[in-house]
Image (cartoon, grey):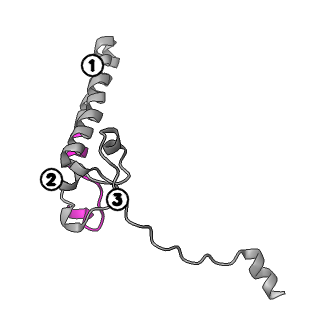
Amino acid sequence: MGAHDEHDMGHTVAGWTGTAVAVAGTAVAGVALTAGSAAGLWLGGAVTALAAIASWVLHLAGWGKATGPRPADRRHWRTRDTAARHGHPDCLGCRLAGRPARATAPAPAAAAAPAPVAARAGARD
């Protein structure tokens, strides 16, 4: 990914497609607004709504990604997520599609919290 080698920015086919369709929809709506066309505004709104649906369908087909960073070898935007058919953990889109929730990885143990400031100040007196 060039400049983003250390970070998983979430660039996926689903994300790029949804963004491109949304930009086209808002461009249509913007032109319609300046032209005073109500039908064009409705068309722009429909194309923008289609962007959300297209992103969701592509995500469910495995062209999106789960929440959180991916392993370094799976970060290319054209890498298909083969685990998507089973549903991603904590993914609203997968739940809306009726895919079962998978268990998430256990949270790391919390470190001991430092003593409150008031307790430390009283210890010096």
Q: Is residue 54 above or below residue 42?
A: below
Q: Secondary structure at mark 1?
A: helix
Q: Residue at x 59, y 78 (%)?
A: 112
| Picture coordinates of residue 100, whole percent (x, y) | 32, 48
Q: Is residue 85 above or below residue 2?
A: above
Q: Is residue 67 visible?
A: yes
- Which residues are drawn in magenta? 1-18
Q: Residue at x 27, y 33 (%)?
A: 53
* Label 1, label 3: how far apart the Cα atoms are: 34 Å
Q: Are marks 1 and 2 in contact (CB under 8 Å)?
A: no
Image quadrant holding the N terminus, namely bottom left
Q: Residue at x 28, y 16 (%)?
A: 40
| Picture coordinates of residue 109, whole percent (x, y) | 49, 74
Closest to the observer, 73 or 89: 89
Answer whether residue 6 is magenta in the image. Answer: yes
Image mark count: 3
N-term mark: 1 or 2: 1
Query: Left or right: where does residue 79 sit relative to residue 97?
Result: left
Q: Secondary structure at mark 3?
A: loop
Which numbered disc covers residue 68?
3
Residue indicated by mark 2: 78
Q: Residue at x 31, y 17 (%)?
A: 42
Q: Amino acid at mark 1?
A: Leu
Residue indicated by mark 1: 43
N-term mark: 1 or 3: 1
* Label 1, label 2: how far apart the Cα atoms are: 30 Å
- Rate crowding at label 3 as few (under 14), some (14 to 19) or many (20 or more) other CA atoms within 10 Å: few
Q: Amino acid at mark 3?
A: Gly
| Picture coordinates of residue 59, whole percent (x, y) | 24, 45
